[in-house]
Amino acid sequence: MVALSPIRLQKALQSVAQSIQWTYSLFWNPCPQQGVLVWGDGYYNGAIKTRKTVQPAEVSAEEVTLQRSQQLRELYESLSAGEASQQQQQQLQLARRPSAALSPEDLTESEWFYLMCISFSFPPGSGLPGKAFARRRHVWLTRANEADSKVFSRAILAKSAQIQTVVCIPLMDGVLELGTTEMVEEDTGLIKHAKSFFAEHHEIQSMPALSEQSTSNPAKYNEPPSFQVGVTMHRMHAEPTESDRQNDEDDDEEDDDHDDDDDEEDEIEGGSGSEVGTLKCSHMITPTLTRIEGATTPNAEHDELMQLGLSQNVRLGSPDDCSNNLNTQLQMVGVCCNTSGVSNHQREDETYHCWNFLHEDICSELQQQSSVQAQELSQEDAHYSETVTTILRHNSSRGDESKSNDYFVPSRQTAFAGWNSTRDHPQIVLSEGTSQWLLKTMLFRVPTLHCRYKDENSPPSIEGEGGGSRSRKGAAQEEPSANHVLAERRRREKLNERFIVLRSLVPFVTKMDKASILGDAIEYVKQLRKRIQDLESRNRQMESLTKTAELQRPGSSKDPNVPRGSGSPQGSGVDHVATSQLKAFSSDKRKIRVLEGTRVVDAPSTNVQVSIIEADALLEMQCPYKEGLLLKIMQTIHELRLEIMSIQSSSVNGTLFAELRAKVKEMNGKRASILEVKKAIYRVFSNS
Amino acid sequence: MEQQSSTQESPLSTNPFVYTFESPHPVYAMAFAPSSSSSSSAAAAASSSSSPRLALGSFVEDYSNRVDIVSFDEDSLSFRADPGLSFEHPYPPTKLLFHPSPSQPLLASSSDFLRLWRLPADPASSPSLSPAVELRCVLSNSKSSDFCAPLTSFDWNEAEPRRVGTCSIDTTCTVWDVERGAVETQLIAHDKEVYDIAWGEAAVFASVSADGSVRVFDLRDKEHSTIIYESPRPDTPLLRLAWNKVDRRYMAAVLMDSARVVVLDIRSPAVPVADLHRHAAPVNAVAWSPAAPRSLCSAADDGHWSAAHPDAIDPAMLYTAGAEINQLQWSAAHPDWIAIAFANKVQMLRV
C-alpha cells in the first residue's frame, strides 16, 4: 500500500483526532531495516499545560494544539535526533519553526505520554500497534491506564496521563493509533470513521483506492455473534465493579444490561445536568461526563459520527471482549518472542501458559505498587522526566549503529545449547540456605570481615589510613555493645522471673521491692527452720505419746474380758488425745501457709497478696469459696490490663486458694499498681 | 599462580568451545580489560594484541587476597597467567573494573576502600622482577565522615571516566573524582545497605538496596531520587543491578533468593517490562550484551548460564557449568566471549 505523503498524513492525523475529539493520534510506520514499527507522525489534541479540564478541540484551541504537536515533535527531535526515521526527519525539517522549544517541565502528563510514544518501537505482534499490524485487525484497549505493563507497555505513562482508551487500527502499510483520556467502548463505527479520513485524502489526491485490508477489516468484525441493534456508541461505565459484574453474566443478560444502559444514556443525553451528576460517582467517570456533554452540544460532525455508530455498530466492546483481547495480546507477545528468539515453535503455548501462571501472583501486587508509584511520579515527574530524556538522547545517538541487530547472533562455534523448554535440565539439589551463597557472603559477610579483622589484629595497613581504622574500631565496639545490651536485658528478665518465683514461695511480703522480697525470704527461711524444729520436737512428743498409748493398749487388749464399756473410756480417751493431737498436727500442717501468710486475717477468711515487679505480677488469694468467684476475679484483673499467664487454684473446706501469675500491660501509659489490684479484688469479694 | 597455561577442556563438559582456567583460589570478582594493553605493547609479540584479558579477584575470607591478571589467547585458545601482574589485595575485592578507556591501564577494586591500581604499560619488559602493579591511590571518605563503610560494589562511568560511583552498607553512594582522588558527592541513597550501583549516563546512576528498591539519581538534582522499582514482596533485598550499556532504556535487577531477573524500562517505572524466570535456582549475576541492545545473560545457582532477550520469555540459549556460577562478565572488547566463574574455575565461553 502506498503511504500518504508526510503532509497528508499529518493532516489526516489532525483531522481524525479533532473529529472524534480524542487526545492524540499517531501513525506507526514499519521500518524495514529494523523490522519494527516506529513512530511516523502524530497529532496531539489533548490538554496543554493545565490538566484535563478544558474541552478539547475548541476552535480557539485548535491552532494552539497544532502548534503544540509541532513543538512536541521538535522537542523530541532535539532530544533524540538520531532516532527519527528518514521520513520523520524530513517531516521535522518542514515542521521546524523558530519558536522556542519546549522543555520537559512544560508538558502535561498526556503530552509527556505523547512525547514518550515517539521513543517506542514495536516488533510485529508485540505491543498494541505491533499486534494490530501482525493480525491486520484493530485492537481496542479500554482502561489502558489500569492495564498491566505486560499488556500495554506504556501503561505507566498512560496512568499518569490518564489515557483510558487506546485503539490501534492497521491502516495502509502502518498502524493508526488513537488515544483518549476518556472511557470509550469499542466501536467499529468510530474505527470506520477514523479510517475514512485517510481514505478521503487518498481520493482527494486521486491516489490508488483504499487498501484491501482496511476495507476487508470491517467485514471481519461483523463476524462476532454478539450483534446488537440500536446501541448507542458511547456506553457508560458507572464503576469498574459494574463491568466486572457484567463479565459474569450470560450474553442474554448482557444484552438486557446494554438496553438498560441505553436507557440511562438516553436520559443523559436528553436530560439535565443534575441527572448526569447523579450517575457519576467514581473518579473514572469525570472524563466521560465531559464526553457526554460534548455529545449533547450541537456538533454536526459528531452527530454524523453518532449516526454511523447507530446504524452500523457491532458490539465488541463488552468487558468480556476486552479482557479476551488482553489475553490474546499476552499470547501474541509470547509468540512474538518465540519467533524472534531461537526457541522452538511447538512449545509456544505451554511456554505462554507457564509464564502467565507464574505471573499471576505478582501481578496484583505490582499493580497496587504501580498506583502508588504513579502518584509519586506525578509529583516528581518533571525531575524524572528530565533524567529519562537525557538518557534517551544519549541512548539514541549511541545506539544507532547497532540498531540493525537487536539480538546477538550466536556464532557457529558457540558453547551454548539452544534452549528447550521440555528438556530436563540437570537439577542441582541445593541444600537449605546455600542459595546465592557467594553473592550473599560478598555482600553481607565480607563487609563485617573488614571491621572484625581490623579490630582484632590491625593488619599491615597498606593505605596507612589512621582515621579509617580508628573509626572502624569504634564501629567494631558498637556491635558487641549492642549484644551486651541484649544479654543484659535477658539477664534482667531472668532475674525478675526468679524474684517472682521467690516471691510466690514466701507467703508474706511486706514490700514489693527486691530488697524486701529477699529480706522476707530470709525471714521466711528462718521461720521454716524454726517450724521444722518445732515439728520435729512435736513429732518426738507424739511418738512418745503413741508409744504410751501402745503400752496401755496391749494391757487392755490383754484382757479381752474387760467389758468394752469399762475399758473404752480410757482407751477412747487415749484415742481421743492421739487423734486430737494428730488433728492438730494435720491442721497445723495445712495451716502453715495460712498461718504465716495471714498475720492479720484469720483463716479461712479473706486474704489477698499482690506483688508486681515491673511487668510481672503475682496474685495470691484466699477467700470463702463462692461459685464463679474465680472467674469474676479473672475478669476484674483483666480489666486492669493484667494478662493472666497461669492460674493454680483449689478449694478446701469451702475456702478457695488461688495463685495467679500475670503480665502487667500498660494502660494509658501506666501500669496498674498493687493497691489498685488489691482494691479491685476486695471489691469482687465484697460484691459476690 | 605459577602455571603458565592451564587450558584444558572442562572435565565437566565435553563442549569444545569452553576453555577453563583453574585459579589457585576461589574466584569472585572478575573484569574484562577494555582491550589488551596498548597496541604498541611488546606483549603483542607474545600474544595477539586483541586477546581478551581478565582480572580475577580471589575470595578468601581473610585479610590476604590476590588479584591475578590472566590473558586468553584466541589463537592457541589457551590461558596465560601473568604472575608478574599478580598483586596482594586486602580482603576479597567485591568488584574489579578496568578503566573504560584502553589507553589508561588502570584497574579499580572495591573492598574496605576503593583502590586504583596502575598496571605496567608493558608487562613483557619487566617479567616477574618486582611487583609491577602499583597501588596508585586509596580512596577513603574518612575525612568528610568519621567512618568509611565497606563497599559492596562500584561502577566506572564510561561517559565520564573521571567518575566512579561506589555503594556501601552504610546506605550511601559516593561519587568519586578519581583524577583528583576526591569525593565529588555522597548521597544517602537508600534506607538500608546499598548492594549495587550502575551508571546510566554521565550524571545519572541507579542503585539497588536491601530496602528492595531500585532508585535513579541525577547528579544535576541531588535533592531527588526516583524509585523506579520495588521488589514485589516488601523488603526483599535487591542484590545486583546491570544497566544496559547499549540501550540505556533497560536495566536488569537480581533479587535475593529469587530465580528471576527483573528487566526494567526507565520509561515505564514500577512495572518490569520483563520478568525472566527460567532459572531453576536463584540468580547470582546478570550481564547485558555489549553489542546487541536487547540481549542479556544471567548466571545462577543451578549452574546455568543463559542468554535471553528482555522481551522474550525463554532464554535463547543455555550453558550448564555443573556448579553454582558466581560471576559472569561479557567482554565489551570481545563481544563473542563471555567469562564465568565458579569455585576456583574461570571459563571462557564462546557465544
Image (cartoon, coloured by chain):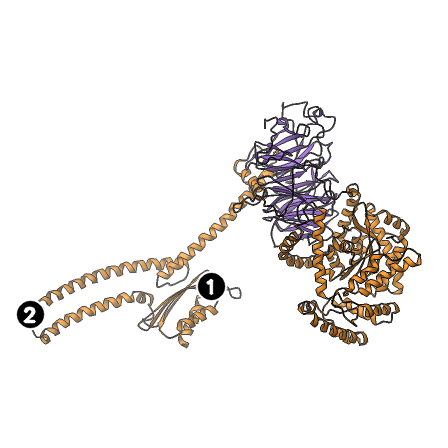
Residue A559 — which label?
A: 2
Instruction: Kindly identify which residue carries mark 1.
Output: A664
- Mark 2 is on which residue type? Asp
Q: Which quadrant of the rendered structure holds the C terminus of chain A?
A: bottom left
Sort mark 2 into few (<14), some (14-19) or many (20+) by Cα contacts within 10 Å: few
Q: Earlier in the sequence, mark 1 or mark 2?
A: 2
Whole-percent x and y of residue B131? 63, 26
- How many angstroms separate mark 1 from mark 2 (CA)? 70 Å
In this orientation, which residue lies closer to the viewer: B243 or B131?
A: B243
Q: How many labels does the image show?
A: 2
Q: Is residue A661 above or below residue B120?
A: below
Q: Residue B151 sits in which quadrant?
A: top right
Establish whether labels 1 and 2 are both on one chain: yes
Whole-percent x and y of residue B260? 63, 49
| SS state under label 2 | loop
Say which chain tag 1 marks: A
Q: Which residue is drawn at 74% across and 31% down?
A: B103
Any idea which chain is the orange one in this picture?
A
Say which chain tag 2 marks: A
Sort mark 1 into few (<14), some (14-19) or many (20+) by Cα contacts within 10 Å: many
- Colour of the chain lettered B: purple
